[in-house]
Image: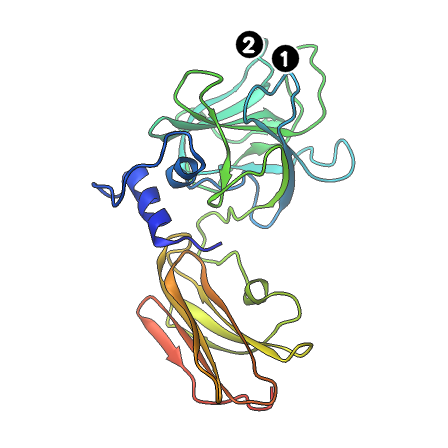
Amino acid sequence: MKLGGAMAAGLALLLGLVATPAAADPVPGSDQAQILATNFQLPFPCGQSWTGNSDASSAHTSYEIDFNRGGTPDADLGDTVVAAAAGTVAISAHQGSTNGFGNLVKIDHGGGWTTYYAHLNSRLVSQGQAVSQGQAIGTVGNTSKPGNNILPHLHYEVRLGSNYPANVQRAVFDGTTFGYPEQTVTSRNCGGAATNPYSPQEVCGAGYSVVDSAALGSDGTVYLLYNSGNGNNCVATMKAKSLGTATATSAYLEVEGSARRTDSGDFGYYAGPVVASGSGKCVKWGGKAGASAYNSPFEHCGS
């Protein structure tokens, strides 16, 4: 997903990274406010796909989500749960008869934002502990209050303030509001590691294979891809630094005899795809990330 400059500015403001707003604040509670105010990721390891739902059961009064994957009732039991964002553990305890949460981890993210991870089989963090985004905090389980027999799943909530249940907010993962009432989501929670969660093949789409690439210093890599099925070339610039933060990134493709096509802006993960038909023609291609750029000559004339 690309993050535009306006989105990044709002995110930085609400996370306390800048002192003054670049534009008017969004309407409280709106989708825009949710996206700008959070940098939450799916509470599961990078690359895993989980199906969440917010049905009308007695456990759900607002935008809570239950997550599962696998085709059997116990398929998720013991799977790793990770922090959706960095923060401090406010609760790590079994709730006993207090509520139906069972083993609960609650993380305080500052600014009134908290996340809840309930029914855990095990807890891997302690109250007062600082945690990073993507850090393992527990495992999926089916713990609850006495007499409440449930199937393994993760009950996940995002809250703002303390006026329950009005404080339960719509969940946002990787800058996109969860598709209530049910959606399957792939985790981009990669623990802050300097690895881009996307690949050039994902950016360009099915049928494309990498023909060439050029390093942009340590800032990223620009790729040239070709689809033999339709004769199209594709260029994508993949960032390696400031992942998830909108920074200047560009990609271009010029087929000999045709005008150059460019995708340029402030993006979080990549620039592109830039696609053009070039079967049997020479192409120029290149891109920029950070302070590094690459510009090819006309080449790959047989692709």
Amino acid beneath label 2: Thr
Q: Is residue 219 visible?
A: no
Q: Position of residue 197 (x, y in %)?
A: 52, 56
Residue in the foreground of this view, choosing between 293 and 204: 204
CA gap, disc 1 to disc 2?
A: 7 Å
Circles 1 and 2: CB distance less than 8 Å? yes
Instruction: Please tell me which residue is depicted at 43% across the width and 79% down the height of the picture.
Output: 260
Name of the residue lying farthest toward the left: 19
**Quadrant in the picture for residue 70:** top right
Q: Which residue is mark 1?
A: 145
- Where, quadrant-wise, is the C terminus in this rendering? bottom right
Instruction: Please tell me which residue is depicted at 39% across the width and 60% down the height of the picture.
Output: 241
Dot 1 or dot 2, earlier in sequence = 2
**Quadrant in the picture for residue 127:** top left
Tag on residue 247?
A: none
Asked if 48 appears above or below 273 in the picture, the reply is above
Residue in the foreground of this view, choosing between 80 and 295: 295
Answer with left or right where residue 5 lies relative to residue 125.
left
**Quadrant in the picture for residue 62:** top right
Q: Which residue is mark 2?
A: 98
Amino acid beneath label 1: Lys
Answer with left or right where residue 183 lies relative to residue 159.
right
Instruction: Please tell me which residue is depicted at 24% across the width and 43% down the height of the picture.
Output: 18
> How many residues crowd around disc 2 within 10 Å: few (fewer than 14), some, or many (20 or more)?
few
